[in-house]
Image (cartoon, grey):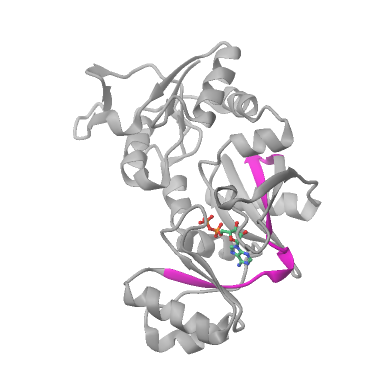
Amino acid sequence: MKIAILSRKKSYYSTRRLVEAAEQAGHEIQVIDTLRVYMDIASHRPGIHYNGQALTGFDAVIPRIGASITFYGTAVLRQFEMMGVYPLNESVAISRSRDKLRSLQLLSRKGIGLPVTGYANSPDDIQDLLKMVGGAPVVIKLLEGTQGIGVVLAETQKAAESVIEAFMGLDANILVQEYIKEAGGADIRCFVIGERVVAAMKRQAQEGEFRSNLHRGGSASLIKITPEERSTAVRAAKVMGLNVAGVDLLRSNHGPVVMEVNSSPGLEGIEDASGEDIAAKIISFIERNARPNRTLTRGRG
Ligand code: ADP
């Protein structure tokens, strides 16, 4: 097969591993810098240009689109879809997953366990919003944040009120969430491919920190997950319409709750922790599923 991988750099761990795995399986694979693709979008024969040449003949495309380039990246991916190239994850699903509020609404509609979460726009509603999510301690999240930046634990009512007020004063979009204390500063990353969790790891926050992000000094280890956690992760990926996803769960008193569904999950932490060849599993999924014009939306929606 001829596979394209949309990624800013060849040297990124995940990109490098996917290239290795594809070549090992005998495929031709080309890394394409997402931001250097240009397109003739009005033509009746959709095309993609790169380095002065038209890109053609691809059977599948692996999007590795960073959060900061979602807008352009999904447009590029849509163009591939319009040309009938099979996307590992579809552009609509990626856009969906990048909107934290929309994601939580979609998951909640399908009855997937979530932390009690509130959202409000006006400072006049803060008191009631806090009451709604069960009062302090609460976690306040900037909707645009990643890697734990903009995630604040407010331990008292007063602290919560002032943090929310401050964020609202800056016109930042935030959500307010029940603090799952019993998770003990740990979350579980489930790596889903198709209908299976192929690996799971526990990320434990540093002493004195509640955020377990590896970028914030958290440490990863292998973990055995329960059947309920397994099915929650698979269902969450499915609701979002993602073939490959990193589903982050917290172990709460009321069962597993989904914090986030990531559409471009990194391979480094999970391959390290699990010892699994996740890249090969992704390539093998593509081999089993890629057909021309197999996109559900073909760039629509
Ligand atoms: P980001 O997308 O920026 O990583 P997250 O929503 O994943 O933000 O939060 C970062 C970390 O903070 C999580 O990995 C988790 O360890 C912790 N955390 C987030 N929300 C909660 C919560 N409601 N209760 C307890 N811990 C939380």
Q: Main secondary structure of the magenta part?
A: strand
Q: Nearer the viewer, residue 250 or 147?
A: 147
Q: Is residue 301 visible?
A: no
The picture quadrant for ligand 1 comes to: bottom right
Q: Is residue 46 left or right of residue 111?
A: left
Identity of the residue drawn at 73% across and 36% down: 274
Identity of the residue drawn at 28% across and 29% down: 36
Q: Nearer the viewer, residue 40 or 26?
A: 26
- The residues colored magenta run 174-198
Query: Which image quadrant for residue 82?
Result: top left
Query: Which image quadrant for residue 172?
Result: bottom left
Q: Is residue 253 visible?
A: yes
Identity of the residue drawn at 33% across and 77% down: 169
Q: x%, y% of residue 87?
A: 46, 32
Q: Is residue 177 left or right of residue 278?
A: left
290 drawn magenta: no
In this view, 126 is above or below 30: below
In this view, 130 is above or below 237: below
Identity of the residue drawn at 32% across and 72% down: 170
Q: x%, y% of residue 43?
A: 19, 30
Query: Which image quadrant for residue 187?
Result: bottom right
Q: Is residue 262 left or right of residue 193?
A: left
In this view, 39 is above or below 116: above
Q: x%, y% of residue 49?
A: 26, 23
Q: Nearer the viewer, residue 119 or 85?
A: 119
In this view, 300 is above or below 103: above
Q: Nearer the viewer, residue 52 or 297?
A: 52
182 drawn magenta: yes
